[in-house]
Amino acid sequence: MTIRRMLHATDFSPASRPALALARALAKAFKAELILFHAWERAMPVAGVGYISASVFEGIWKSTRQHAERNMKRLAKKARSDGLRITTLLAEGPPAAAIGLAAKNRRADLIVIGTHGRTGVKRFLLGSVAERVVRTASCPVLTVGAKG
């Protein structure tokens, strides 16, 4: 298998750190470009909590994007210190679908993604982005548990 481009999907959580470490090591070993990717969905108002103006929601969305940009710059700087070719990419939308689309559009040979290891009710309520990516991606997916 030749790996020229690898996409690491991150949610910036501690659970994604082992996956990033492995993605960096693999990118270095294969001399591959590492695409650091993050997607988020816009929060929607919950019925019954009162009125929140559109300007407040716009402020929240802007803040979310700025937070993602800062985190992405930090991750890219660390990865570049390994001498890696890094591309950063942010997207708004359902994370699993956005990851698959980004990997396809960027012609990634591999997706590296962390898992939170949720089970039971938490998994039922929150779902598993990694599981959906594995089922729908157009390239191989390497999942890495939160404990590495």
Image (cartoon, helix red, strand yellow):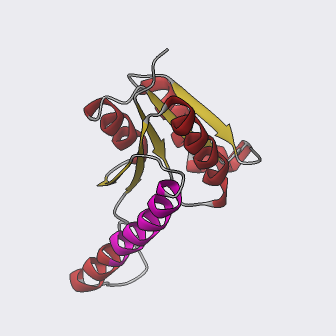
Nearest the camera: 50 or 86? 86
Q: Residue furthest right?
A: 147
Q: Is residue 71 located in the magenta-colored stretch of the structure?
A: yes
Taking the image as shown, residue 118 lies to the left or right of residue 80, namely right
Asked which quadrant contains residue 4, the reply is top left
Q: Residue furthest top?
A: 1
Residue in the picture at 57% in, 50% down? 126
Taking the image as shown, residue 111 lies to the left or right of residue 114, namely left
Query: Residue 122, image x and y in percent?
Result: 67, 50
Q: Does 80 sit above or below residue 123?
A: below
In this rendering, does residue 128 appear at all?
Answer: no
Query: Residue 12, image x and y in percent?
Result: 54, 60
Q: Does 47 sit above or below residue 145?
A: below
Nearest the camera: 58 or 39? 39
Q: Residue furthest front?
A: 83
Query: Residue 147, image x and y in percent?
Result: 77, 47
In this rendering, does residue 29 appear at all?
Answer: yes
Query: Residue 115, image x and y in percent?
Result: 63, 43
Image quadrant in which the C terminus is located = top right
Q: Is residue 38 located in the magenta-colored stretch of the structure?
A: no
Disc tally is 0
Most common secondary structure along the magenta stretch: helix
Residue in the picture at 49% in, 14% down? 1
Asked which quadrant contains residue 60, the reply is bottom left
Q: Does 107 sit above or below residue 52?
A: above
> Residues in magenta?
63-80
